[in-house]
Image (spheres, rainbow, N blue to C red):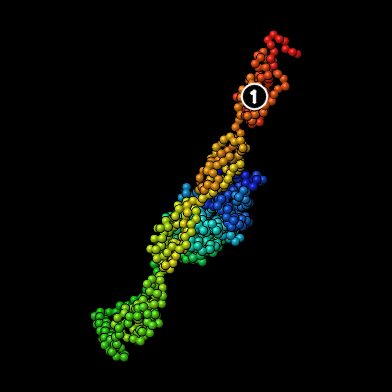
Amino acid sequence: MNPKIGSSNMDTSKILADRYELTAHVARGGMADVWEGRDRLLGRRVAVKILHPQYSRDEAFVKRFRREAQAAANLTHPNIVGIYDWGEADGTYFIIMELVEGRSLRDVLRSEGALLPRRATEIAAEVALALTVAHRAGLVHRDIKPGNILLSKTGTVKVTDFGIARAWDDSQELTKTGAVIGTATYFSPEQAQGAPADARSDLYSLGVVLYEMLVGRAPFQGDSPVAVAYQHVSTEAPAPSSLNPDVPTTLDLVVKRAMQKDPEARYQTAEEMATDLSGNGGSATNGLSAPAASPFPVEATGQTRVMDRPLPPAIPVSPLPPPRRGSPWAYVAIFLLLGTLVLLVWLLFRQLGGPGGEVVMEIVPDVAGETQQDAFDILQEVGFEVRPELRASNMVALGIVIGTQPPAFTQLEKGKIVQVVISSGAANVVVPPVQDETLERATQLLEDAQLAVGEIIEIPHETTPKGVVISQNPRAGFEAEPGSTVDLTISSGKARIVLEDLKDLTEQEASFRLAQLELLVDTKTQFSEKVDEGHVIKTDPEAGTELEKGDTVLLYISKGPKPIEVPDLFGMSPSKAKKTLEDLDLVYIEATTTELVTDPDLDGKVVEQSVAPGVKLKKGEPVTVTLGEFVPSGTTAPP
């Protein structure tokens, strides 16, 4: 009996494609299980990645998976985990990869925390070299994270899963469920917004990994993946050196440039980032290619040095005139006289209304609710200058006047400017996060944000309870027009599996099929006259029953026909002995010789049998009997 693929209890004698022997379970991921195996043809140890059954059943995904695996197999570099083979066996798809003995960077960070800046830089530099090779070949990784970075026992850094993430990201099933590629912790802003990822997206993710190596935690954290993804789009991470004083400021620059929100402001190639990381023996202190924007000013001295804090801007200072001797009161009198003269001129100007004479005052008309053109005409007829100002409004239609500044009915000098405030339409609202909320709660949250529930799609989900939101479109944090809809994907509970008819299959065959459906197996044996030994008699529950993943199916395995206990035939007539044996499905055979007896009652009766009473035989096996021949006492037996 074979436990299901992906569990640590899987039968390690399982052979894939008559070539690859699985020897030990290594890890379980979101897309596949990883096993240590042995290539029996070449006699080498390998890593075997086995796709989870739900992806194996998606034909579109399998095609993309094959294409990307073949492309990744062409990558050859010391920092890239090699792909040796790809195949399918009994509906199970697998990849044969280079076996790296060591630990993942994720495990190292969990056990050790922040790394020394020099070691962190060396690891990031080797990952950048791997990305350089992949990007030149046209492959974008899309899922750079500590779990995909392996550290061998020799210290070599190996990047794995090249190209596979693309097949997963494009999977039709995953698109429907709203699942996302990789982990939100290492998303680039464009991936968080659902935009296409390119080579610069990998460099952003590498910047996040470098940040975590330097600080001991990721730059953005939150209660949900949506909250983390939103921070990637909208929030600047603090400099690593502000959390770990051992980090040199030059590494702050590398991280900052790699994690720019705008892809155009990041490193444009992995080779460029690798160069900066490899400067000065791997400490990234020299040779920094010009960053998009430096967080700190650079002080020019005998050698280049980045200052820890910005200096205040220099203030130009003019030389003061030399003081003159004499009394200061003369100057005071002059200033007072000039001030008084200016005030008198201004009052006279106001009194006469400027060059034209008396000031003419008008009341600002109420033009709220008018169209822009009508409002302009009304105000200009009164004699005001008009200036438009657009302002979003959820109450006033597009192109209609909201009001004026100064407000209506205010007295204003004729010829002055009146600002006409015109509606530019409803202001956009921010889509709230409703993932992991019940449908009722999600509906209320959207209504509170002046949005509505759009299309609702129900799909099975292994971990999300029935009726809870799995994903939303648009995603949280995006701006939308008030009244627009948000489509929701709702969990219908765990996927239902219809149990197939497993009768007459061998125990091993039936167990393997149940394992592919992620069902658990238990067995019980019993005798069967109709089913061969080692084959399935029936299942509990019966075929056609709907089950959930993880449910247990009991297999009744045949022990073959029940053994027959040989009866005691002594003293029976031949006809009775024959009927007795034939009724038990045993074969009656009469010996050609007789046994002399002195008891006349045993004459012609069974006195011996080849199989002792109580012995158990299988159906159809023979029992030979010997009949007695009476010889009176004292009589000499015939020759």
Helix, strand, or loop for circle 1?
helix
Graded by Cα atoms within 10 Å as few (under 14), some (14 to 19) or many (20 or more), the crowding at tag 1 reads some
- Residue at 53% over, 42% down: 540
- Residue at 59% over, 48% down: 48
Q: 580 or 494: which is nearer to us? A: 580
Q: Label 1, on which residue?
A: 576
Q: Is residue 383 above or below residue 439?
A: below
- Residue at 40% over, 69% down: 313
- Left or right placement of residue 639 versus residue 484 in this view: right
Is the C terminus in the top left, top right, bottom left or bottom right quadrant? top right
Q: Looking at the image, can residue 27 be seen?
A: no
Q: Looking at the image, can residue 578 be seen?
A: yes
Q: Position of residue 157 (x, y in %)?
A: 55, 52
Q: Position of residue 330 (x, y in %)?
A: 25, 82
Q: Amino acid at mark 1?
A: Lys
Q: Is residue 194 above or below residue 588?
A: below
Q: 325 or 460: which is nearer to us? A: 460
Q: 168 or 40: which is nearer to us? A: 168
